[in-house]
Amino acid sequence: MRRLYPDESQAWGRVMATVRPLRPTLPAPSPAIAKAPVPVVKQEPITSKPAARPVIRPLRQPPTAITAKAPPQNNLDGSWDRRLSRGIVSPDSSIDLHGHTLASAHSMLDAGLDRAIRRGDRVLLLVTGKPPRPESERPHARGAIRAAVADWLAASRHADAIAAVRGAHPRHGGLGALYIVLRRPRGG
């Protein structure tokens, strides 16, 4: 940046004297705090081609299934995660929470987990319904069950039997469903 010539500086001062702020400004900092002078850096003329502007792309993150405050231990190996993300694993059983109140959905989830553990199932498909769209009006009338599932699983009496919770493949419900991977039963 170059410095303003004296006549430019005077013209700028006259213009700034006529400007009114849109919003009230905060009070000026106390004069006791002095700012250090900013050193002037002399710029050299550019002789080479100017650098191209970097392309900034928005961060695309895959939709996350659920994040609990105290998530079940995620100790799946990479092959499990790959198989789940590709939809290769078929669930042993499923629980559909559509049309339930929070209380009935919670008790249905607890009973379904109990049955799946007793049967020795490894993968349980939990159908919760899709989360509300970001552009939908707030407060959201939908998605209360899905929002509560993470806390329910973390506080469940079956939490120690849950190895991981992952988002379902579109073949099994996509954003409207979750895989609950159960630990292998101990002993014979």
Image: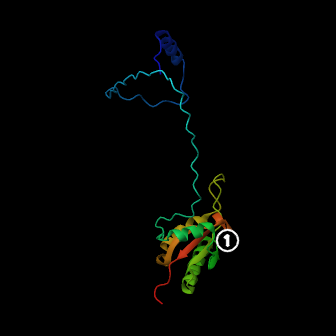
- Vertical placement of residue 38 versus 3, above or below: below
Report whether 90 appears left or right of 158.
right
Q: Position of residue 33 (x, y in %)?
A: 32, 29
The residue positioned 47% from the left and 64% from the top of the image is 69
- Vertical placement of residue 185 versus 171, above or below: below
Q: Position of residue 111 (x, y in %)?
A: 58, 81
The residue positioned 46% from the left and 10% from the top of the image is 6
Q: Position of residue 114 (x, y in %)?
A: 55, 82
Q: Tag 1: residue type?
A: His
103 and 44: which is toward the camera: 44
- Vertical placement of residue 4 versus 124, above or below: above
Q: Seen from this angle, which residue lies furthest left?
A: 32
The residue positioned 63% from the left and 77% from the top of the image is 94
Q: Position of residue 62 (x, y in %)?
A: 59, 57
Q: Quadrant of residue 133?
A: bottom right
Display colour scheme: rainbow
17 and 44: which is toward the camera: 44
The residue positioned 49% from the left and 9% from the top of the image is 7
Q: Seen from this angle, which residue lies furthest bottom?
A: 188
Q: Seen from this angle, which residue lies furthest front?
A: 48
Q: Which residue is mark 1?
A: 98
**Secondary structure beneath disc 1?**
loop
Q: How many marks?
A: 1
- Vertical placement of residue 25 versus 60, above or below: above
- Tag 1: Cα neighbours inside 10 Å, few (<14), some, or many (≥20)? few
62 and 51: which is toward the camera: 51
